[in-house]
Image (tube, rainbow, N blue to C red):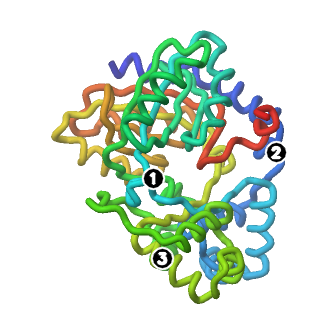
Amino acid sequence: MWGTMLGKCDSRCQRMEKVCKELRTSGGDLMESVRLDELDRLVIGALLAHPRATHATIGQAVRSSEATVSRRIARLRRTGAVRVVGALDSQISHRARSVFVRLRCAPGAADELALPLAQWDETGSVKVLTGSVDCVAEVAYTSNEHLYALMMHRLPQFDGVMATFSNQVIRRFSTPHGWNPGLLPDTVVAELRAERRDRWSERPEPDEPAPMSELDERIVAALIDDGRMSWQELAARCGVTPSTARRRTEALMAGGVLRMRTVVEPEVLGLLVNAFVWLTISPTKIGIAGEILARHRSVVMIAATTGDRNLCGEIAVASDSALYEFLSETVGHLPGLIHADVAVALRTVKRAGMIAADLRSSGS
């Protein structure tokens, strides 16, 4: 098994050259339009650790001035290299559940169906892949009937879908809310995380949904649009005083309902190989394996799932050799490993609920 899987790495250098060429020539081209220096990387690392940290706090963390940090963040956000968003935790709030949908497509069909799939309100992320499947999407559904309609009626309407596989998320070990790619020392990351009001780590969902008022709903909607909105701006948007806006927001954060996230494509950070892993682990070892992967810097997210694979996740590494090392040294040594499948992302069509900038106009 491992000889077959790891042997695939031999051809990835040529494939990644093609990926980088596509990234350079597609629309906005983040890697060309946003040239990051070391301070930019440190600022992004601070935002990943604490998305709502003040400019002064970030300045202390990266050893720069508050004014410089303010200018850097403004530029990074203006160019689209970084987004800071709020997110309603659908599982804590019991609003929805998540399922990973993998599609095997006819030759050339994946690119044609990825954008229409990304235009679904239910999809949080969509990627075109190369590997055993051609496209993967994270889909939110509110009931079994809703999922039935998506899988049995809407998906089959796409031309070129040869097979579908679904894996429902039943336990999250890590999510992008807590991704730490190692841009800052661990001690600095820990200090920044300690100041967060929202929850960056994962925990089992409660038995009962967290209640939300009409004001709570307005606050969440506003911060989904702009996660770094000031208390004054948030208060004006929601029609309350700044103190009320802050108090209710921090209550939502403390309860785990409202979570903050800094969204950045791995390629912007020089992590050119973005891949998905689907693992089969002995049922008695799923928790141990999930926790091991959750602590790894290369893991953007990892979750226990139902279906043909019981541990699914996204990774981001700098090179093919780094991918090989991750597979052989980390995945290969997971306790209870039975089977592993890897697919490399060729294009991010949608991430964190937003379609890629260079694709939005083509979807109208």
Q: Amino acid at mark 3?
A: Arg
Which part of the image, by quadrant, shows the C terminus? Answer: top right
Residue 329 visible from this viewpoint: no
**Gap in Å between the C-alphas at discs 3 and 2?**
35 Å
Residue 165 visible from this viewpoint: yes
Confirm or deny contact between disc 3 and disc 2 (CB under 8 A). Answer: no
Name which residue lies at 46% across and 26% down.
151
**Is tag 3's residue or tag 2's residue first in the polypeptide sequence?**
2
Q: Is residue 328 left or right of residue 287?
A: right
Q: Amino acid at mark 2?
A: Glu
**In the picture shown, does residue 258 fall above or below 348?**
below
Which dot, 3 or 2, sits closer to the camera?
A: 3
Q: Determine whether the residue tagged by mark 1 lies in a helix, strand or loop.
A: loop
Crowding at mark 3 (Cα within 10 Å: few <14, some 14-19, many 20+): many
Q: Determine whether the residue tagged by mark 2 lies in a helix, strand or loop.
A: helix
**Gap in Å between the C-alphas at discs 2 and 1?**
28 Å
User: Which circle marks residue 175 in the picture?
Assistant: 1
Q: Determine whether the residue tagged by mark 3 lies in a helix, strand or loop.
A: loop
Q: Which residue is mark 2?
A: 32
**In the picture shown, does residue 41 fall above or below 148?**
below
Splitting the image into 4 quarters, where does residue 350 fall?
A: top right
Q: Is residue 149 left or right of residue 55?
A: left
Q: Which residue is mark 3?
A: 197
